Amino acid sequence: MTLVLLLLIPFLAALTVLTCKQSRRAVRVAMSAGALEVAAIANAVWRVRSAGVLQVGRYLRADGLTAFFLLNVGVILALVLVYSIGYLRHIPAGRFSSPRWFYSLTFLFVFTIMAVYLSANLGMLWICVESTTLASALLVGFYNTKGAVEAGWKYLVVCTVGIAFALFGTIALYLAAVKSGVNPESALDWAALMNAAPNLGATRDLIKLSFVFVAVGYGTKIGFVPMHSWLPDAHAEAPTPISAMLSAVLLNCAMYALLRFDTITSHAIGSGFSHTLLLIFGGLSVTVAALLMVVQRDLKRLLAYSSIEHMGIIAIGVGLGGPLGLFGALLHTFNHSVAKALMFFTAGNVRESFGTLRMKRIHGMARSLPWTSAGLVVGSLAIVGMPPFGLFISEFMILTAAFSGSRYLIAILLMVSLSVVFGALLHHFQRMLAGKRADVPSKLKLVPTDFAVMSVCTALLVMFGVRIPDAFAYLLQRALVVLQ
Amino acid sequence: MGLIELAAAKALASSAVFLFITLLMMASAKRISTCIVLFSVQSAIMAAEILAVAYAGKSVESYAVAALVIVVKVVAIPYLLFRIVRNLKASQDVASSTTGAQSVFIMAALILLSFFAVAPYAKTLRLDEDLLAAAIALLLAGAFLMVSRKKALMQVMGLLVLENGILLAALTTTFGMPLVIEIGIFFDLLMGVFLMGLFVFRIRDTFEHLDVSKLRRLRG
Amino acid sequence: MNLAIDVIQALMLIAIAPLVRGVIARIKARIQNRRGASVLRPYADLLKLFRKQDLVPDTASGLFRLAPVILFAVTATAAVFVPVLHASALFGVGGDFILLVYLLAFGRFFLMLGAMDGGSSFGGMGASREALVSALAEAPLLLALTSVAILTHTISLSGIVLATVQQYPLHLSAVYVFALGAMVLVAIAETGRIPVDNPATHLELTMLHEAMVLEYSGPSLALIEWASAVKLTLILALLVGVFAPWGMATGASIVGLVLASGAFALKFAVSAIAIAVIESSIAKLRMYLVPDFLGMASALAILAVAFTALMR
């Protein structure tokens, strides 16, 4: 029931919100549904924490890894929903035609994401990941401007094609499992596969083939570099709350899918092959994204490339493996989502106040938008991995894992890229922040909810930078157990 | 060995050839509607193949999958696409960036490539090499159609062909996935085509053309 | 007995060639809701032309008169190599399909010479277009025939036909399919049918074959027309013989021969209808798209050859 509720609430919410013609009522319904969902997530995480594994029927399952990612979704969902109250208020009515459709699609999106995390079957997992694309494509194209339609189309087509490769990989894995004597009916069930994993070694080539396709497929969705073309467009053109959702929830969601496959592959044929592949994708993503960040002109695109970079860091963490690397990678997913949510929130404020995201045309932010600027500064310090913020800890762990495993090339690559990112952000933001009090076209008045989300993000980042709470660390350990 | 078994065996043995023919014709097709018809035919061939497998294996699930293929891929999606084409009232040209001969040449090369690609696997796994090669060829052909045709609808077409390849791969290697998964995949596919159709209309309304190669506002 | 059949089938090919043309024209007329001329009309045309005076341009040399004769002789010779009623031909030798292709090319070469010798600008233009088409059509034709030859492990047309007749009719080899595709495209180009050329046009922008023979008249024109009819029939017979030889006599019995003639008539009727339908339903390609058209044929032919190694 706990798990079913997680799916039921967003699904019903998506339908209920649609019936609310008044935008104020729609917001109220959405908020209460959101609160319910967050409560349900908290409940589910708690149950999993005490019970270890929850399974409902054949297709719903939650273990430690699920619980950890569910927590991530819960936090970000709460932040995004609260932020959207202020966002809707700031936006002129003409641009944002229909809040009820916005919320309905958002809840549908949440529904599919929940389904990804809860599916006990890798085939089901694929179906759900594909549904996240379908559910969010309309959100990306929500504004119906030229840019938004183009971004939505690109997102839909590129991700669907990419994901198709993942399906191919899934089939290859299924074939390997069936050939190794697993019952065809349950050959994609996570539990059955994990049991059979040590025996899968006989079909070595097939497992390798499967992982390559899955890495390319889900990697497209994660935004690994050669397949990242959709990501900056989608992030830049989507409404800001959705940009935050994409970056902080959706990318992790795809990463989760890849982690599952990586675990099985490692168990079957040893971790060498899959981890090397992840290191290659990760290294490529970090380097290319860092370099591209230098030349960006649009604030949200800059943030999108930063997401690619951080997904690369996470992939490197997983690729390095070992308790330290994996712990760092998982911690980094959480930290990154909080920091990136904060940055997208500030970017949304900037957009509504300056009417543009072109960084060239933004001056004197520090004077005209002091609080937003503060949020941006905190976010960017956190995102480049400065202490006392959480990302420092996780990046430090990953670097330590690299050094202790004598992976100097990766370590150096990571450090160089991080300093390039630091330079890029410094270069872009000092121009935006400094300068005279610019002629801001519409004076943006922040509402309490804006302050609330920004301060919660900051508090979380600092908290995780100073000390990881015990309860959270325990949850992380449980997640690591699943992966090892 | 009755007549039906014989027919089923023959259908399986030569369906790869028919699939290749649809691919080559798709490469040479100049109108979108031709491609839609060809896709429908291609799916019908696959459905026949699944029926043959179902008959040979006496599996009820495979019959269900065959029914799904017929309903979704042979009828529903082509119908949907035809409606889109009719309502768009735009030119039917596929706007290929390669000439007909080049397309057929490339398609032929892809077919040959797929034979070389599957050769090692087909041997070790004792699978039907022709069908597996056809699956890979469909995959590659779909990708080729997507990159070489500029019309938005042709990208959908390419995607569908690619998806057919994956279905065929699943069919030849594992005799199909569990039914629940298959249903989910088909549902996703149908929704995907529906959404892409929606976007095609939006592209036409906001850009006043359907040439996706001209969608280049977002760069860098 | 065998020798007799060989002679009969070669003569028959030459004799019925105008009839095939007439039938196609008649079916086309019917499709287009006209009554159309009698199917025997081409014979009447030939007779009329033979009785007329042969006009030669002042600028022309002896080649002008010689070309049609050579063309007809070569085409008639080619007919001797094609199995029609039974799986062998009068001059069935190893490698005869290559000889066949080059005999046809030889004839066309003389026709082109004759056209240019005529001195009119149309002749030159037609010749250059014909050269383009034939240069592009030759490779796929040879490749397609080669692929079938490799598949059947033989080097003669009669061997190919015999192997095809004897194999299991339901067995569909990819090689046959692709080779057939290539051959059909080539046949359309070779025989000057729509969409490559329009045999009924006299529009200078589009004509190929007609441009070449514009200067000819009388018996010379009759020979050329007859030769091109024979070529059409011959290529049809080749297609039918290689790809659908069922019904051909394998032994030398009267019953077999009668059956074979019946099957032959049926298959020709079907091809004639197919040609008529295609010609009525599609438009002629622009000249610069013809290489594209033949490029597809080449791709198919190459695929056919490659598949001889892949599929058996």
Image (cartoon, rainbow, N blue to C red):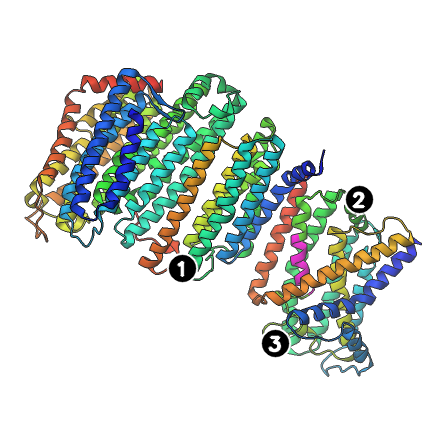
Question: Mark 2 — residue?
Answer: C166
Question: Mark 3 — residue?
Answer: C203
Q: CA distance from mark 3 to mark 2?
A: 47 Å
Residue B159 found in image quarter: top left
- Kindly identify the amino acid type of the residue bearing the numbered disc 2: Gln
Tag 1, which secondary structure?
helix
Please tell me which residue lies in front, A135 or C69.
Answer: A135
- Kindly identify the amino acid type of the residue bearing the numbered disc 1: Leu
Tag 2, which secondary structure?
helix
Dot 2 alpha-carbon crowd within 10 angstroms: few under 14, some 14 to 19, many 20 or more: few
Question: Which of the two marks, 2 or 1, is nearer to us in this view?
Answer: 1
Q: Residue at x 64, y 74 (%)?
A: C201
Position in image of residue C41 (x %, y %): 77, 75
The verdict on a common chain for dots 2 and 1 is no
Q: Please report the bounds of the magenta region as a residue range.
A: C181-191
- Kindly identify the amino acid type of the residue bearing the numbered disc 3: Leu
Give the numbered dot on residue A45. Answer: none
Q: Main secondary structure of the magenta part?
A: helix
- Direction from residue A225 to residue C97 in the image, left or right: right
Question: Mark 1 — residue?
Answer: B88
Please tell me which residue lies in front, C161 or C71.
Answer: C161
Which quarter of the figure is the N terminus of chain C placed in? bottom right
Let me know if residue A138 appears in the view: yes
Position in image of residue C282 (x %, y %): 59, 65
Chain letter of mark 2 equals C
